[in-house]
Amino acid sequence: MAATPMNQLSALVNNMFATGLLDEQFQQLQMLQDASAPDFVSEVVTLFCDDGERIIGELTKLLEKSSVDFDRVDAFVHQLKGSSASVGAQKVKNTCIQFREFCQQKSRDGCLKTLDSVRTEFYDLRSKFQTLLQLERQIQGFYPK
Amino acid sequence: MAVATETPFHVLAVDDSLPDRKLIERLLKTSSFQVTTVDSGSKALQFLGLHDEDSPVSVHADQLDVAVNLIITDYCMPGMTGYDLLKKIKESSFLRDIPVVIMSSENIPSRINRCLEEGADEFFLKPVRLSDMSKLKPHILKSRCKEHNHQEQHQQSDSNSSESSNPTNNSSGDSSNSRKRKAADDEILPQTIRLRHS
């Protein structure tokens, strides 16, 4: 099978579904993209990535403090959980659920460990999203609407 | 053959999360709604023409530049929650008939019941999907029928002191009611036509 951008895109997206990185909510996003909103997926994904980066930064700062405000940490994790659910970022969303448990328990160690997991997963997802969007742009370049 | 142009229903969407706002906006537009999004409850109230102090004298229906047919709001927001916003809307004599839908990522039965008891028409679990959009129009149509009936009742009865005690407010209320009634008459018919053909 030729490694055309379209084939590469399919393979990437299928892989992201197969590995549990994405769930069916992402398909909802794809369904919402059409000629009247040709960049919808790209726009939402970009907003999610920017939002996620911001939240992870805040979480890092909050957990560096000697006395941790777990309510504030929980509020930020709740935000990230919400936006990851909205774009279908299943793995990140599930890690956020775990994260909130550690917040309830007021466990600094638990929170720090989970923050590391969220960070790793988020950056992995983001880099795959960036590849996905690049491929989409290439394809749109071949078939201008 | 002339095609009747129907004004699309206008939904005000309230959510502090930017990706979520983008999503709800697209879901609503795909379902042929006109959409305004705001990022907080207080901005929603500003848009609806309701001031925070909630002084009845300053509330005029003609402050609403565009009629809002439904409000859909996230529950968890900093400052004013979706529940607080719902309460303010239901406490307002000229906003209370606008259907309100609450969205939440958390499935907490006591939260859901609280919202429904306060007058929310529907509760959506996030992430909101395309299939949820079909639940919105029935609430809009139901509230428009209710409003239409209210206009008829006000026409028939002379005394209308249920809405407010301020005489100034009553007269402006009447003129806005008659404007709304005219609008309701004009718009209810095309919608029923739409129903028959869909």
Image (tube, grey):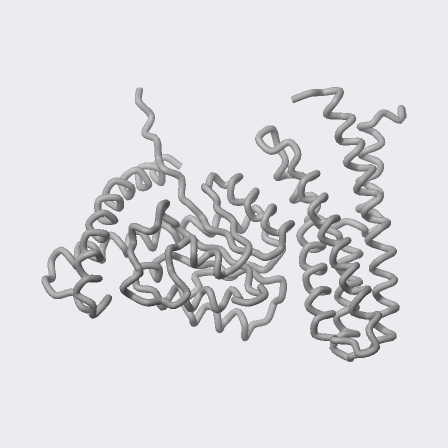
Residue A131 rendering spot, x and y as whole percentages: 83, 37
On screen, residue B77 versus residue B122, left or right, reads right
Residue visible at 84% across and 36% down in the picture: A11
On screen, residue B61 versus residue B127, left or right, reads left
Residue visible at 35% across and 46% down in the picture: B65
B10 over B147 or under it: above or below: above
Residue visible at 62% across and 62% down in the picture: B105
Residue B147 rendering spot, x and y as whole percentages: 27, 55
Residue visible at 30% across and 61% down in the picture: B58
Q: Quadrant of the N terminus of chain B?
A: top left
Residue B19 rendering spot, x and y as whole percentages: 65, 49
Q: Quadrant of the C terminus of chain B?
A: top left
A65 over B70 or under it: above or below: below
Numbered disc total? 0
Task: Name the quadrant containing residue B117.
Answer: bottom left
A132 over B133 or under it: above or below: above
On screen, residue B79 versus residue A144, left or right, reads left
Residue B176 rendering spot, x and y as whole percentages: 23, 52
Task: Name the quadrant containing residue B116.
Answer: bottom left
Task: Name the quadrant containing residue B77.
Answer: bottom right
B112 over A52 or under it: above or below: below
